[in-house]
Each structure stands twice: as C-alpha cells, then as structure tokens.
Amino acid sequence: MTDTILCIDIGTTSLKAALLSDRRTVEAKTRVALEKGSGADGWISALKKAVAELKSENESAAIEAICVSGNGPTLVLERDGDALATLLWNAPTPKSDSPKTESLYIPRMIAARKVFPGEWEKASSVMSGPEFLIKFLTGNALTILPAKGFEKAYWSDEELRRFGFGADERAKLPPFKKMGSFAGKICEKAAIGTGLLEGTLVFAGAPDFVVALIGTGTIYPGKLCDRAGSSEGINLCTSRPIFADGIRTLPSAIPGLWNASALIPDSGRRKDESPDALLEEFSSAIEKLRNAAESNGELFPDELAMTGGQCLDKEWISRKEKAAGMNIRVPFCNDAELIGDLVLARLALGDYDDMDEACFVLCGM
C-alpha cells in the first residue's frame, strides 16, 4: 500500500484531483468538468465524483492527508455550509467608481454586494473557492493567506473600512491562516457524502497560481514557469519587484522574493481558434519578461517549466519551444498545482524541514 496525499485544485472549468506519493509518482489522477453556472455546489458534486474515480483507479493507495487549492479571487457567499451565491474570478461585474486599491478581493466584494444583495445580507461567511471546499470537508471557516506579503492583495481592516464595509460585513470574512496550515479533519457529514475517511487531516493549500509556482519550483530567482490551461500566465521569480507595461508583480510564496507575470487571457480557446497568433503573443510575453528582468539586473533562464492542460499536447509544446527559443520541461504531474499541494501537505506533516528541501525532493529540482 502506498501512502499518498489527496491533492485537490478547483479550476475555472474543472476540478482536478490526484493521489500523489512522496516518491514523485501519480498513483491516481482525474479531472472532473464543472457545469457552467453550477457555482460552488458544483465543486462538491465534482469532488464526490473525483474521489470515486480515484479509488476506482487505485484501490490500494492510502490517503494520509488532503490539501485543497483553487482559483481566486472567486467569492462564495456561504451560510451554514450552503453556497447562497458564487461570483467567479472572471465573471463580468458592474462598473464601479470606487477608489483604487491594490486588493484583488475588495473590488470583487463590492461587485458581489451589488450583484447578490439579498445573498450578501444573509451570508454568514464570504470566502474563496478552496476555503469553501475546506469548510465543507471540515466545518471550519478560514481565509488562506499565502504569505504575509500578500495582505495588500487581500484586505486589511483599515482598507475594508475605507471602502465602506461595516462591522457586520467585515465579520463575514474568516480569519487569515497561512498556506499549509492545518485546517481540520474530515467531518462525519463530508465522510458520508464523499466516501473519504472521517478524521483524515485536511491542510490549506493556496491560490492556484501560488501552488503552481511551488509545484514547478518557481521559488528561486531566475526560475520561469508557464501556466497554460484555459487561461495562461508566464511567471518569473525575481529577487526584487520589477515593473513594466503588461507585467503584474506580486510577492512570491517565499518571503523576500517576487513574482513577475505576463498574462494571456482565453489561451485555451485561442490555441484551437488562432494558434499562430497565440504563439506570437506567447513569444512577445517571454521577451517582455526577459527585457524587464535584464534591465533590472535579474536573472533570466534558458528553460521554463510548463504546467496545465496544454501540456498534454506534445506538438504544441514543441511549437512553444521554438516560439520562446528555450527548452520546456513538464513536471511529473502536468497539473503542478497538485504538486504544490503535495509540497505544502508534506511540509505540514513534518516530512521536510523547509520549502527548499521539500521542493528539491518533490519537484525534482
């Protein structure tokens, strides 16, 4: 029997789950499509189906613990474990004349309050995707904060007050817990509903782009990864923040480091409809990051790690290598978000001393 971590990631169009071992093997893996418009309730249905499929694929794999990650800033308005409304991160929202903010979440909260006024009023909690699934599994409410440096991208009490959120509204936001934190144990209700063993440990993952950076080892200056699924983001780890047109800079998962990214919307659809134009944009994004890095004295590699659904197309990988002028490697699990979950869970269980050691072993650095 092989001990594994059940790694779960809520994507935009599908829920991905895998049983990953610390020997860098995929003991079972599945992807369950999410019905358009199903919202958070659809994630629970998809999880139930995913667990059944994983068990069917490998009956001998033991689930030692569970780690959950997912997209953001998706918001779920929740009460007593039920999703009253879901506002996906990419859902169109009414224009707002609110002041500017560095927060990715406050504008979505303002939108959710406008789009779902009744549900907003009734909700006891406002949380993102992975946190909602964690509450379903454990009964515990939390907000995953990847690292201290991410607070501006989330919220502070002062910033919430500045945007007019009252005390009752601020109380809807569960307390911050650092990624990799112990979230709780599988409760009786979730065990009955999913077939998971009651009492199994559950750990907080992180936003999908953060666990993808961890899972590809993009946590050292000069490391580059391409997250290419339904949308696409090319990410470079840097030792200092760099700024340029078309580049978004956020803190890294590692304190003191930064992540510079160039985003390509609707990449999955455009791969089929206009691949040549997409390759040109991909090449341009690589060059944009290269120029920004070199002009700021940062390292830029001759290799990148690629993760996501587009990794399944070997011919496409070859075309991207030519467009970028660099080698592309694919991790042992092509959905590196799940490897990031594995790293966080194993760290939390005390199997490794720090992130460096865990990534060296589990990401094949």
Image: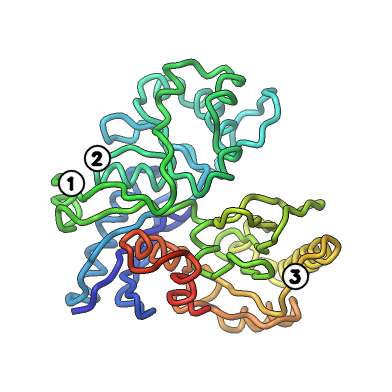
Q: Quick one: SS at disc 1?
A: loop
Q: Which residue is mark 2?
A: 139
Label 3 element class: loop
Q: Position of residue 250 (x, y in %)?
A: 65, 50
| Residue with the most extreme right position | 295
Q: Which mark, by number, is residue 123? A: none
In this rendering, the label closer to the viewer, 3 or 1? 3
Which residue lies at the image location 40% right of the left edge and 34% below the top edge? 175
Identify the residue shown where x is 45% and y is 64%.
354
Please tell me which of labels 3 and 1 falls first in the chain.
1
Say left or right for 20 vs 231: left
Q: Earlier in the sequence, mark 1 or mark 2?
A: 2
Residue marked by disc 3: 299
Q: Nearer the viewer, residue 184 or 336?
A: 184
Q: Nearer the viewer, mark 3 or mark 2?
A: 3
Please, what is the three-letter code of the amino acid marked with disc 3? Answer: Leu
Nearest the eye: 76 or 251:
251
The local secondary structure at tag 2 comes to loop
Q: Residue at 58% x, 73% y: name it.
A: 306
Give the residue type that dot 1 points to: Cys
Which quadrant would residue 320 be assigned to in this image?
Answer: bottom right
* Circle 3 Cα neighbour tier, 10 Å, few/some/many (<14 / 14–19 / ≥20): some
Mark-to-mark CA distance, 3 and 2: 44 Å
Residue at 60% across, 21% down: 163
Q: Residue at label 1?
A: 187
Residue 205, picture quadrant: bottom left
Left or right of 176, for residue 114: right
| Callout count | 3
Left or right: 216 in relation to 129 = right
